[in-house]
Amino acid sequence: MKIDYWKKGKVTFSMEDYIEKLLNEAPYDMEGTPAACHLFNTNDGVRKLSEEKVQLLTLLSKLSAQECVGKIGKMKGLNNN
């Protein structure tokens, strides 16, 4: 994980290198992983979410992530607010 403190009052967390390494080292068929096989199954017959709900869930996820980052910054004394 990379943590960027270059902008005053802002911290950026990046896991791109970790994820790239994970994907490169993961077996193609995912055999031998601790994850259960059913986690990778999909159901094409299920009703899809409406675009409005997709947008709402995306927004809520982003807001939750921002809240977590803000709290971590405060705990580490990185945010003076």
Image (cartoon, rainbow, N blue to C red):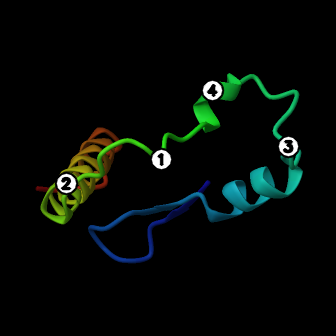
Q: Residue at x 75, y 22 (%)?
A: 34
Q: Nearer the viewer, mark 4 or mark 2?
A: 4
Quote the CA–CA distance across marks 4 and 1: 14 Å
Quote the CA–CA distance across marks 2 and 3: 34 Å
Disc 3 is placed on an element classified as loop
Instruction: Say whether residue 64 is left or right of residue 20.
Output: left
Of pointers 1 and 3, the one earlier in the residue sequence: 3
Q: Nearer the viewer, mark 1 or mark 3?
A: 1
Of pointers 1 and 2, the one earlier in the residue sequence: 1
* Residue on which disc 1 sits: 44
Mark 1 Cα within 10 Å, few/some/many (few <14, many 20+)? few
* Residue on which disc 2 sits: 63
Q: Nearer the viewer, mark 2 or mark 3?
A: 3
Kindly identify which numbered label has been placed on residue 27.
Answer: none
Q: Residue at x 26, y 68 (%)?
A: 9
Which residue, as the protein is rendered here, is positioned at the far bottom?
Answer: 7
Quote the CA–CA distance across marks 4 and 3: 13 Å
Three-letter residue code for mark 2: Leu
Of pointers 4 and 1, the one earlier in the residue sequence: 4
Kindly identify which numbered label has been placed on residue 38.
Answer: 4
* Residue on which disc 3 sits: 29
Of pointers 2 and 3, the one earlier in the residue sequence: 3
Three-letter residue code for mark 4: His
Query: Are dots 2 and 3 in contact, CB under 8 Å?
Result: no
